[in-house]
Every structure is written in structure tokens, then in C-alpha cells.
Image (tube, rainbow, N blue to C red):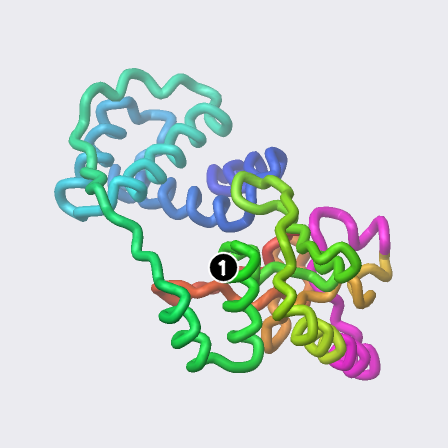
Amino acid sequence: MKLMERVKATMRVKRYSLRTEKTYCYWIRFYIRFNNLRHPATLTGHEVRQFLEYLAIERHVAAATQNQALNAIVFLYRHVLDQPLGEIGQFSRAKRPQRLPVVLSHQEVMEVFQHLSGSMLLMASLMYGSGLRVSEACRLRVKNIDFSRQIITVYAGKGNKDRTTLLPPSCVQPLHTHIQMAEQQLNARLEANAIPVSLPYALDRKYPNAGISLAWQWLFPSSRPCFDERGASFYITFMPLPSKKPSNMPCAHLL
């Protein structure tokens, strides 16, 4: 098995998210190219230190980015190659400046909402009223909304943790309308080609009809099916997350 295939297989066994898998694979490839395509097993902590200093001094990356690269390399040696990385020693770290958070006033938030409509307005209202992260709002399913108890359940949030949060009263009626639209879209797909939604892990084998049930539909689905490279199938996934650069990220298997 090739090295990158081993990396992916190890991460999937350990249930790392697809986003983390893509990020770690990017840094591991970058690390190998930096060292003229030498196999990582032949490299030592000295080469790792040079790579990290190159990122900070030549590439001017942020401190979080440098730490991300270090985490990917540590994962490679500890869990894939199963060999000690060795002493890295002191290296130039990207500085993490002290920043004051930018907080909008209620009036400013309302002014932003005036420029939004449809799904974007509903997503922004949920993030503001329920304290959802962008990724959590994008990955909401119909079953995550509990109208009777006025709560939203977030599965596999930050740190792969589940939590519940309040459902804003102002979002109840828009959500009812949105779910009715999701049901209409589901019925249209069933009449056409019945493309299911992406499901976490092996749930599609345990419950074959879950992918075409209303409860598992995404509240904010993508406009077209995507190809899941893990399952080699086409699925309906959630609305793509905002990104600073184009991404060909396939379906994410998240609850």
C-alpha cells in the first residue's frame, strides 16, 4: 500500500473527519515535496525543523497553520510509520498576535439581515439566535430540529462532540416552511432518480431507506449531487462551506 493510502486508511480507522483527512494529506505531501520526494521514514527531526522554519520565515504562515502542519507530521510518524520522530529542538515559530474579537451590535446584525433572503437569511438567523457555527448550520438535518421542545441538536460539532442549543422562536415558522420545501424536493427526486443524501459511516447499509427519508434530509442541501470518493457513489450533500479558495471536497460523512 502506498504511503498516502496508508495515511488515509489510518485516519479513517481512527474516525477523523474528511476535512481533517484532506488537510493532513496536504501537509504531508508538502513536507515530502519540500524534502525532494525523499521518503519520510528516512528523514529526521532536523528535516522537520527546517520545514517548520521554512513555513514561518519564507511562507509567513499564521501560527495556527504552522501548528497544523506540525500535527500532520507528528500523526504521520506516530500512527502511520510507527517510528519515533526524534528531537525537533527549538525552531522559529510563527507569532500569534493578540487580537480583539469583532462583535457586531444588535442593530448592525439586523442591518446585515436586511441584505439576506431565503436560505441565507434562515441560516444567519439560526447562527445568531442559536449560537451555531457556520459548519454546524450547513450540516443541519430535518431530524435535528425538535419543535416540541424548542431545541436544536448538533451532532459531531467541534471536537466531534454533540450538544443541544435553543431554537429561536422567530425561526420556527421559517423552518416549518423550509422543511416543507425539503419534502417537496425529496418527492421530486424520488420520482426522478432517487439520489439519497449522504449518511454517516455505514448507516446506509444498516438502514437502507434512511437516505430517502425526510428526517435525514439536509435542511440546506447542495444544488447538485456530489461524488463520495469513500463510497464511490453519488449523494446529495449539505451546502458547501464558505472557502477562501476553490475546493473539490467530496461528501462529508458527518451526523
Which residue is painted at 47% across and 79% down in the image?
116
Read off the residue under disc 1: 134
Up the image or down, 160 lies above or below 225; here it is above
Q: Nearer the viewer, residue 182 or 124?
A: 124
Which residue is painted at 85% across and 58% down in the image?
208
Left or right for 54, reference 182:
left
In the displayed orientation, state which residue is furthest to the left. 57
The segment highlighted magenta reads 183-207
Q: Amino acid at mark 1?
A: Val
Q: Quadrant of the N terminus?
A: top right
Q: Nearer the viewer, residue 118 or 83?
A: 118
Which residue is painted at 47% across and 37% down in the image?
3
Which residue is painted at 56% across and 60% down in the image?
137
Left or right for 89, reference 223:
left
Q: Position of residue 112 (x, y in %)?
A: 40, 74
Query: Callout 1: few (<14), some (14-19), or many (20+) C-alpha neighbours within 10 Å?
Result: some
Q: Position of residue 224 (x, y in %)?
A: 61, 76
Q: Quadrant of residue 196?
A: bottom right
> How many numbered badges does the structure rendering display?
1
Left or right for 83, reference 54:
right
Q: Say which element carries label 1.
A: helix
Up the image or down, 26 lies above or below 126; here it is above
Q: Quadrant of residue 44?
A: top left
Q: Is residue 20 magenta?
A: no
Q: Position of residue 7 (x, y in %)?
A: 50, 38
Up the image or down, 55 lies above or below 207; here it is above
Q: Is residue 187 magenta?
A: yes
Q: Position of residue 22 (x, y in %)?
A: 47, 49
Left or right for 246, reference 174:
left
